[in-house]
């Protein structure tokens, strides 16, 4: 059985004013909060026990999720007395997690096949799997290339670049990450992934043909609402 840790302690500052009075994971999308959509997805992937790492307005998250029984899950809580980053609370949660476990941002909105990701992760002795998504960025200017003497060597008119971004979804191996966690120390997930990489512990990126929406800014949140209405 695999367990999951949901990072739900952030303040969601980019999504203000929506997050001024309630936490970002409880922002509604359609008829349901983002967090409930994620909990249902984890249950569908075979997860039965979830840890919620909470801080900002945590009493509202507790009041909404309670013990998880209404979602068919067992939910426990890890309270960050102060912000510890997107991976800092792992140090307080490890003893309650499975040998391999899922970590997800509390505002994750995707149809990524989590069960498949777990299955692929377990096929190899690796430290971590990162769910990644290909995004395209269009530069709104003509880019100029020059040599050392400022002689023109190239001109690219509004080019588009593709790149992989982290979706905020991971599968981690407990024994692999444990030596790198210090209780009370601030640690973001990108830092932890780089620490594992430098220690020679394999970190594999996994992509799927899927939907992923970043609802970090009000305009992104509005776009996600519009997309969900279109698919309803």
Image: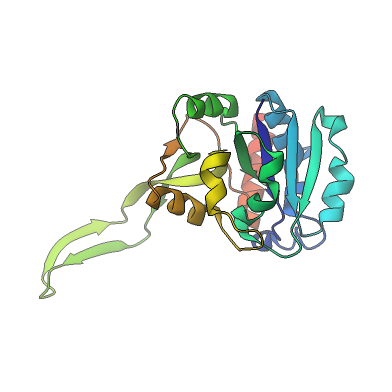
Relative to 182, is 221 above or below?
Answer: above
Residue 106 in view here = no
Relative to 135, is 211 above or below?
Answer: above
Relative to 41, is 132 above or below?
Answer: below
Question: Residue at point 85% right, 48% down?
Answer: 62
Question: Residue at point 53% right, 53% down?
Answer: 180
Residue 229 in view here = yes
Residue 181 image point, x, y percent? 58, 54
Question: Residue at point 54% right, 52% down?
Answer: 189
Residue 120 image point, x, y percent? 48, 26
State the image quarter where residue 20 is shown. bottom right
Quarter of the figure that contains the C terminus: top right
Task: Give the side of residue 134 with respect to residue 153, left or right.
Answer: right
Task: Give the side of residue 203 with respect to residue 25, left or right.
Answer: left
Residue 207 image point, x, y percent? 45, 34
How is this picture coloured?
Answer: rainbow
Which residue reaches farthest bottom? 149
Query: Which one is nearer the viewer's eye here, 88 or 22?
Result: 88
Question: Residue at point 81% right, 56% down?
Answer: 22
State the image quarter where residue 1 is shown. top right
């Amino acid at each position: 059985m695999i367990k999951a840790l949901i990072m739900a302690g952030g303040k969601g500052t980019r999504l203000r004013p929506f997050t001024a009075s309630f936490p970002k994971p409880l922002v509604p999308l359609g008829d349901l909060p983002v967090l409930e959509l994620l909990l249902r997805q984890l249950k569908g992937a075979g997860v039965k026990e979830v840890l919620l790492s909470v801080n900002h307005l945590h009493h509202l998250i507790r009041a909404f999720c309670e013990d998880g029984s209404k979602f068919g899950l067992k939910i426990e809580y890890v309270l960050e007395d102060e912000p510890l980053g997107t991976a800092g609370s792992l140090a307080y949660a490890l003893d309650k997690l499975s040998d391999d476990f899922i970590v997800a941002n509390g505002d994750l909105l995707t149809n990524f096949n989590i069960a498949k990701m777990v299955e692929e992760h377990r096929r190899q002795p690796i430290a971590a799997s990162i769910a990644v998504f290909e995004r395209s960025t269009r530069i709104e200017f003509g880019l100029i290339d020059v040599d050392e003497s400022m002689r023109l060597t190239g001109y690219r008119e509004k080019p588009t670049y593709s790149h992989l971004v982290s979706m905020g979804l991971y599968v981690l191996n407990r024994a692999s990450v444990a030596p790198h966690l210090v209780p009370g120390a601030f640690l973001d997930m990108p830092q932890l992934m780089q620490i594992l990489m430098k220690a020679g512990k394999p970190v594999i990126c996994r992509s799927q043909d899927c939907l992923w929406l970043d609802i970090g800014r009000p305009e992104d949140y509005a776009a996600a609402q519009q997309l969900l209405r279109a698919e309803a």
